[in-house]
Amino acid sequence: MSRADSASATAFAQRVRRGFSGEVDALELFSPGDTAPPDVVRYTYDTARALRTVTFEDAAGSSEIWRALSTDPFGRVLRARLGNGATEELTYRPDGRRELLAHRVDAGSATRSVLFNGYDGAMLLKETNETSSLSAAPPTVTTFTYGVRNELARAVVHPRRALRATLRIATTVSAT
């Protein structure tokens, strides 16, 4: 497969290498006209064929860009380390629906947290709630609506408002 970016006329080619059961083992990235070896993204799997690591190799060497640190019995990643040292944690609904409830990334003292606020009967996400100290972006809520074929029809991002509550206290006066 190859592609040319019309804005800069830069072209590249890539080749996918697959394992015996069809999983991607490597993605080779070629620069046409360049005699250097291709840059390679390598994928390794555990015995259950669940993704365990992703590494990037180029002329400068090899670096790990993702590693699964823990998984659950369903093979879902619960904790992973990113190439920059940040860690991510994923939380799933404990019953049989396997819904993603939260995704958190910790990079030093900074954190990004996304809460997945509900799914409909077709397992389509209804809303997310995001907060982050990784950037100056304000906390947001994103709501999703879908078409008749379950395709995403609209995603609306709006700032999260502070929670306001009104407490009404009823008092009863009794005469004695």
Image (cartoon, rainbow, N blue to C red):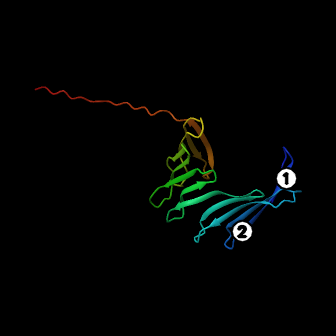
**Image quarter for residue 18?**
bottom right
- Answer yes or no: do the residues labelled 1 and 2 have beta carbons within 8 Å? no
Q: Residue furthest front?
A: 60
Q: Position of residue 31 (x, y in %)?
A: 84, 56
Marks 1 and 2, how far apart in space? Answer: 23 Å
SS type, badge 2: strand
In the depicted view, which residue is nearer to us: 19 or 128? 19
| Residue 10 can be seen in this image | yes
Q: Residue furthest bottom?
A: 20
Q: Amino acid at mark 2?
A: Arg
For mark 1, give the secondary structure: strand
Q: Would residue 106 appear left or right of 27 to someone viewing this image?
A: left
Image-based side of 56 in relation to 112, left or right = right
The location of residue 17, given as percent across then percent down, is 74, 67
Residue 120 visible? The answer is: no
The residue to which callout 2 is attached is: 18
* Residue 147 place in picture, x, y as percent: 61, 48
Give the crowd class for mark 2: few <14, some 14-19, many >=20 residues within 10 Å.
Answer: few
- Mark 1 / mark 2, whichever is N-terminal: 1
Q: Measured along the vertical axis of the image, is residue 143 above or below residue 18?
A: above
Occupied quadrant, residue 60: bottom right
Q: Residue furthest left?
A: 176
The residue drawn where x is 57% and y is 44% is: 144
The percent position of residue 98, horizontal first and vertical second, equals 50, 59
- Classify 10 Å Cα crowding around label 1: few (below 14), some (14-19), many (20 and above): some
Res 11 label: 1
